[in-house]
Amino acid sequence: MLTGIHFLLTYACNYECDHCFLYCGPSAEGTFTVAQIREVLAEVKKLGTVEWIYFEGGEPFLYFPIMMEGLQLASGMGFKAGVVTNCYWATAVEDAALWLAPIYKTNIEDLSLSDDAFHHEDGEENPAKRAAEAAAKMGMPAGSICIEKPTVQPPTEGKGEPVVGGGALFKGRAVEKLTDGLPTKPPDIFCECTHEELIAPKRIHVDSFGNVQVCQGLSIGNMWEKPFSEIITEYDAATHPICRPLSRGGPAELAKTYNVELDGEFVDECHYCYLIRRSLIEKFPEYLAPRQVYGLTEEGD
């Protein structure tokens, strides 16, 4: 049952993090308008199951007025609302409070602050910690998201294989920037999707291009071409050309279904799945979208 909608309010970001699985950055395009947000929320309300609405990106604070209107609309319709931010705006605790004050008035129920080495230098004096301090003083619910750079953890007591830790997902820019030197495994062992619920998704990501994504870059329809509520109610993983093999046998089954042969081994399921999907974009452009999530332009690379 679908309970959460995550608006990718914009793909634009003032950072260009190595771990970003959406290839966000200063030159990334795609930002919601207020009218589009209003249209999606009306469709979401029809479903009757969604509890949470999140605004994230990219960096949603780059479009603060639009984000604010989205929060007010969501709250006014009875949804619980949240925001995910890199906190670039928290130049001081007092200043952070000025940014947060209007958000607090929308009855926001979750403020997720990116606080890790990808976004900020180590130490107490960084924007995320200033934002957290300001939120705490205001009584605003806030928590940290901390994704560390991948590390190789040796097997316990000499048994098993090395484990990759840190929390980064190996798709998007992370495949390009973070996989070198990490231990890999043969592709035939990746027989399940371990991060997303493809058969009955509980959360969906939507972007301003209209893509309704069960996983970043894996679309089940375009909500500017067909109403969002219809896309969700009619979705069936068994008839989706990408979700069907993934739900049955993971990336290994996806590669087998479409005769995709990639050289080498891979860090994990996401790494293998991402590269398979990237190789299939020209075959399934409406399902593997948007292209920029795969590091490609609309004209093709």
Image (cartoon, rainbow, N blue to C red):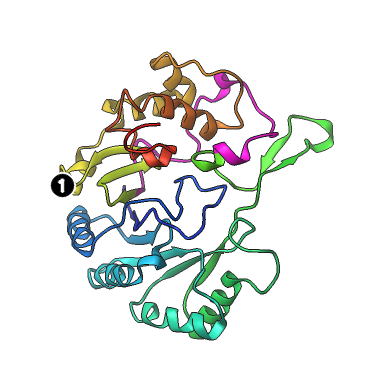
Q: Label 1, on which residue? A: 227
Q: Is residue 217 visible?
A: no
| Residue 115: image location, x then y, percent | 59, 63
The residue closer to the viewer here, 191 or 123, is 123
The main secondary structure of the magenta stretch is loop
- Residue 60 falls inside the magenta stretch: no
How many badges with numbers are in the image?
A: 1
User: Residue 194 at x, y = what percent?
Assistant: 50, 36
In the rendered view, tell whether residue 30 sits above or below residue 85: above
| Residue at 53% in and 67% down | 143
Spot occupied by residue 161 in the image (x, y as percentages of width and height)? 73, 30
Going 18% across and 62% down the picture, which residue do you hit? Answer: 35
- Please report the bounds of the magenta region as a residue range: 175-204
Q: Give left or right: position of 283 versus 148.
A: left
Establish if 212 lies above or below 128.
above
Residue at 35% x, 82% y is 105
Closer to the camera in the image, 287 or 24: 24
Nearer to me, 286 or 141: 286
Mark 1 residue element? loop
The location of residue 29, given as percent across then percent down, is 35, 51
Q: Quadrant of the C terminus?
A: top left
